[in-house]
Amino acid sequence: MKTSECDIVIVGVGGQGVILISDVLGRAAVKAGMPVRGAETHGMAQRGGSVINHIRLGCRFSPMVPTGGADVLLALEPAEALRFGHYLSRDGVAMINTDPVLPISVTMGKSVYPGLEDIVDPLSEVCKEVKTLDATSLARKAGTSQAMNVVMLGALSKYIPIKEELLLDALCDVVPKKHLDANKRAFQIGKAEVE
């Protein structure tokens, strides 16, 4: 899939690091001399609400990925993958962290969180490939569960036209020095998970 253009939709809930991934991708694209456009939308992100970012690598026009146009849907939360699956192209890849963030309606017993197969099966019908990984557990192996988003970034690196060293350089720009080693390990773990 590594062509000079790539449309990515990154989704999750507030606090998961969707914006950090977008920032790293944007910085890395600039370092590569590649045109990049992006847009972020988030509602009650600070309270666990949906966060969605569009990143268009190699694009010189609109920052928004059109419906049915995403080469990659990177979901840091499983139900958010299903919510935004309509962005995937038929040739696209959905990458899903399998560790859910349960909404209050589920924790109070007023609704039921869907099973992983209820998320993966519908997405499998609209895109070429669905990859699932427990990025939260993998991040713990790297030293901190908060690097789950960087595990997902490492997994994403296989599918985008930006060199790994530029992604890591951009990561160094945005992650505090004291957390950098764990984040670099998380990136490598995520990358290895999809190879």
Image (cartoon, rainbow, N blue to C red):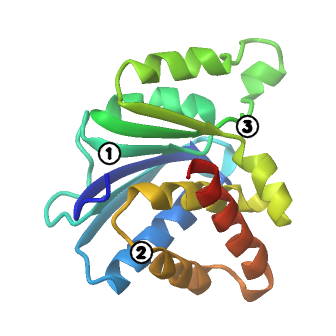
Quarter occupied by residue 44: top right
In the displayed structure, 87 sits above or below 119; it is below
Q: Which mark is drawn over residue 31?
A: none
Q: Nearer the viewer, mark 3 or mark 2?
A: 2
Q: Which mark is drawn over residue 99?
A: 3
Q: Residues within 10 Å of mark 1 (few under 14, many from 20)?
A: many
* Residue displayed at 49% across by 32% down: 130
Locate residue 47, reporting x and y percent. 69, 45
Q: Are dots 2 and 1 in contact, CB under 8 Å?
A: no
What residue did someone put label 2 on? 163
Q: Residue type at mark 2: give it.
A: Lys
- In this view of the protein, which residue sits in the foreground, 166 or 64? 166
One can see residue 126 in this view:
yes
Q: Secondary structure at mark 3?
A: loop
Q: Residue type at mark 1: give it.
A: Asp
What residue did someone put label 1 on? 71
Q: Secondary structure at mark 2?
A: loop
Locate residue 29, reporting x and y percent. 35, 75
Q: Nearer the viewer, mark 1 or mark 3?
A: 1
* Residue displayed at 65% across by 21% down: 116
Q: Position of 181 compared to 61: left or right?
A: right
Q: Secondary structure at mark 1?
A: strand
